[in-house]
Image (tube, coloured by chain):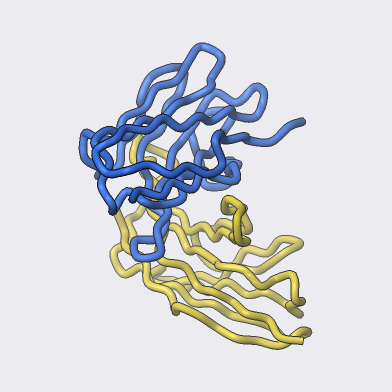
Chain colours: A yellow, B blue
């Protein structure tokens, strides 16, 4: 299973764009990249998922370069409520390899 | 529709004891996965149950076991507790076998081993 590496923490201010990068050098051909958000005392919540290039939804964008050895979660115009831990997850969702391994996460602190 | 519920929310045990945690998935969901979350190791996959059968297993010792009932509710058991088992135990449910974009997590059970 591919191991992921993320920055431990990041600080930002309201209204700014935040980019969190995750390294996954050993990503396999069948692996997808998924990002979760977790607030204190809650379970993780799915944000976005992608395989290559760029994916965008109403919450975030995910940029994946051609070699897929890293990915960047982009949160546009963050607010105080975006303060949370963000996890990058790499896993094979098409075969039996469904043991989903989370990284240590990035603690994002948004200041007013 | 009610979300994933876990009981109890908090638990304190001593070393050597055993503990059973319960997870009720979202109605209609057939898959339940269990995770252990600690500050040092992050979120680690324990196992997944689907239709009462364990389908996937993470790298945890045999002291960690689970089961799923016909109504999809799941229990996780940890025997001979160690201090390092102190963690937040999360379960997640899915309609079918777990996928990252279809899992819904519960609030977790915080286990403290003294």
The residue lying toward the viewer, choosing from B81 and A40, is: B81
Q: Residue B87: give x, y in percent of width and height.
A: 41, 52
Does the rendering let one see residue A109? yes
**Which quadrant of the structure image shows residue A47?**
bottom right
From this view, report whether residue A82 is shown above or below residue A2: below
Residue drawn at 37 percent across, 51 percent down: B86
Asked whether, in this view, residue B62 is left or right of residue A58, the answer is left
Q: Residue A48: give x, y in percent of width and height.
A: 61, 58
Asked whether, in this view, residue B19 is left or right of residue A40, the answer is left
Q: Residue A18: give x, y in percent of width and height.
A: 64, 81
Residue drawn at 67 percent across, 74 percent down: A75
Asked whether, in this view, residue A26 is left or right of residue B11, the answer is left
From this view, report whether residue B33 is shown above or below residue B113: above
Q: Residue A95: give x, y in percent of width and height.
A: 37, 37
The residue lying toward the viewer, choosing from B53 and A94, is: B53
From this view, report whether residue B99 is shown above or below residue A87: above
**Which quadrant of the structure image shows residue B39?**
bottom left
């Amino acid at each position: 299973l591919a191991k992921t590496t993320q920055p431990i923490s990041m600080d930002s201010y309201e209204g700014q764009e935040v980019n969190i990068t995750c390294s996954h050098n050993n990503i396999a051909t069948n692996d997808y990249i998924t990002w979760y958000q977790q607030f204190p005392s809650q379970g993780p919540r799915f944000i976005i998922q992608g395989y290559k290039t760029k994916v965008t939804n109403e919450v975030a964008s995910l940029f994946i370069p051609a070699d897929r050895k890293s990915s960047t979660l982009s949160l546009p115009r963050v607010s105080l409520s975006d303060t949370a831990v963000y996890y990058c997850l790499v896993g094979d969702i098409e075969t039996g390899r469904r043991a989903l391994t989370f990284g240590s996460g990035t603690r994002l602190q948004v200041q007013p | 529709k009610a979300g994933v519920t876990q009981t109890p929310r908090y638990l304190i045990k001593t070393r050597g004891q055993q503990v059973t945690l319960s997870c009720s998935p979202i109605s209609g969901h057939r898959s339940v996965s269990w995770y252990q979350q600690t500050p040092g190791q992050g979120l680690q996959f324990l196992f997944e149950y689907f239709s009462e059968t364990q389908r996937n297993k993470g790298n945890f010792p045999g002291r960690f076991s689970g089961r799923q009932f016909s109504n999809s509710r799941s229990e996780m058991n940890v025997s001979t507790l160690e201090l390092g088992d102190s963690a937040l135990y999360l379960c997640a449910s899915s309609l079918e076998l777990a996928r990252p974009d279809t899992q819904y997590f519960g609030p977790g059970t915080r286990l403290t081993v003294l």
